[in-house]
């Protein structure tokens, strides 16, 4: 729900190059100038910096580094994002919180974001590290009621859609490592995805798509065991990133990707995006999850998002899920 602070910040986003007068804000928002001044003071206490100019108004000079609920909501309103989005200070796991809200009957679709997670979940039971100032911890929740077999390419499609958005918005070409990792051009992991679903006999009843995306910061900011492999969009770009804008635009892009998946139009661009962002085709890999691992050379994916391997003797293997490791040539 939009509040006064978000509305004030939205006015600054709409006029980035000129001051915004207190009189104008008061009239447009239907409050007193004292109320506007009071909210600006509250925003200053949260880390916003405003410069006041006599007879001209206020200019927004800088914003907090970490995600601020009011500013994040203002960016979402600027983008006209319709589904409900909740930004929490901290949570055990955004996927777990989304599942709890679905179980409690909250109308879907909706999104849950958190500045930090105490028990962020990754694939295969791993933990996902999130830094307070630069990570987007996000879960999108749906009640799709689609056949389970339609869900197979979902995670891969969402990753490709996010890659396409990042390239369009920031000029940075990410790579997708099947099945759920996004990499910067130098091979560092900048995002991981985790999809969880509750199934009835013939349909997907509840669906939660989880994303951990490292927006800002440098590799040195990660725990020692991750510094050699983890990266951020900001580090890959080599310039400061507007975390609030980037986060809001990513949420909007993912909701749009879901709409395309639900409508079935996603398949029109799936192959093109796979060819542009895939990092495994032609590589020698080992894939293991259950049973004996399979070794081979990646030969793309099929229409359901399963990995195709060329194994010994010219044979082919189709792998629906697994853990991929690169093999030395």
Image (cartoon, grey):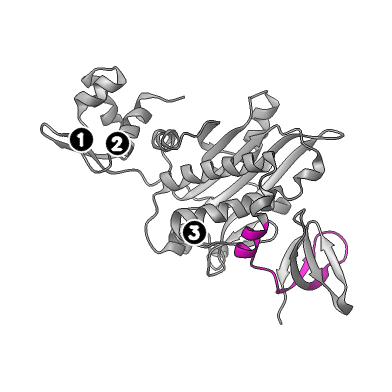
Q: Mark 1: give few (<14), some (14-19) or many (20+) Cα within 10 Å.
A: some
Q: Are marks 2 and 1 in contact (CB under 8 Å)?
A: yes
Determine whether 160 is above or below 104 in the image.
below
Which is nearer the eye, 124 or 167? 167
Which is nearer the eye, 190 or 217? 190
Q: Where is residue 89 in the image (x, y as percent from the top left)?
A: 49, 36
Which secondary structure, mark 2?
Answer: helix
> Mark number for residue 232?
3
Q: Position of residue 150 (x, y in %)?
A: 77, 44
Q: Position of residue 302 (x, y in %)?
A: 77, 59
**In this rendering, does residue 207 appear at all?**
yes
Q: Which residue is drawn at 42% across and 48% down?
A: 243
Classify residue 50 by image quadrant. top left
Q: Residue at x 63, y 44 (%)?
A: 210
Q: Are marks 3 and 2 in contact (CB under 8 Å)?
A: no
**Magenta run includes residue 278:** yes
Q: What's the CA distance linking mark 2 and mark 1? A: 9 Å
Q: Residue at x 31, y 30 (%)?
A: 8
Q: Mark 3: give few (<14), some (14-19) or many (20+) Cα within 10 Å.
A: many
Q: Which is nearer the N-term, disc 3 or disc 2?
A: 2
Q: What's the CA distance linking mark 3 and mark 1? A: 33 Å
Which secondary structure, mark 3?
Answer: loop
Q: Are marks 3 and 1 in contact (CB under 8 Å)?
A: no
Q: Mark 1 points at which residue?
A: 58
**Magenta run includes residue 209:** no
> Which residue range is magenta in the image?
271-296
Q: Name the residue under label 2.
A: 12
């Amino acid at each position: 729900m939009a509040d006064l602070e978000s509305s004030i910040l939205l006015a600054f986003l709409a006029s980035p190059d000129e001051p915004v007068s207190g009189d104008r804000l008061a009239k447009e928002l239907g409050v007193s100038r004292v109320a506007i001044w009071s909210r600006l003071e509250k925003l200053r206490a949260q880390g916003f910096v405003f410069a006041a100019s006599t007879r001209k108004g206020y200019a927004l000079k800088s914003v907090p580094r970490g995600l601020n609920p009011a500013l994040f909501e203002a960016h979402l309103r600027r983008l006209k994002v319709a589904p409900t989005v909740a930004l929490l200070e901290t949570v055990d796991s955004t996927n777990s919180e989304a599942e709890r809200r679905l179980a409690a009957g909250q109308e879907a679709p909706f999104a849950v974001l958190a500045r930090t997670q105490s028990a962020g979940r990754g694939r295969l039971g791993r933990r996902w590290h999130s830094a307070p100032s630069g990570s987007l911890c996000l879960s999108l929740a749906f009640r799709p009621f689609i056949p389970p077999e339609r869900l197979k390419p979902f995670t891969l499609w969402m990753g490709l859609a996010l890659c396409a958005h990042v390239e369009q918005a920031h000029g940075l070409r990410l790579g997708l490592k099947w099945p759920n990792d996004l990499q910067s051009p130098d091979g560092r992991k900048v995002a991981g995805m985790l999809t969880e679903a509750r199934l009835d006999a013939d349909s997907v009843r509840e669906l939660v798509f989880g994303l951990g995306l490292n927006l800002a910061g440098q590799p040195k900011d990660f725990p020692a065991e991750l510094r050699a492999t983890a990266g951020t969009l900001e580090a890959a770009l080599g310039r400061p990133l507007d975390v609030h804008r980037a986060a809001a635009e990513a949420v909007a892009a993912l909701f749009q990707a879901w709409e395309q998946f639900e409508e079935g139009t996603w398949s029109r661009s799936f192959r093109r995006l796979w060819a542009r962002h895939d990092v495994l085709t032609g590589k020698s890999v080992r894939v293991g999850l259950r049973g004996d691992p399979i070794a081979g050379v990646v030969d793309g994916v099929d229409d359901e998002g399963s990995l195709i391997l060329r194994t010994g003797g010219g044979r082919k293997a189709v792998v629906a899920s697994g853990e991929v490791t690169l093999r030395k040539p």
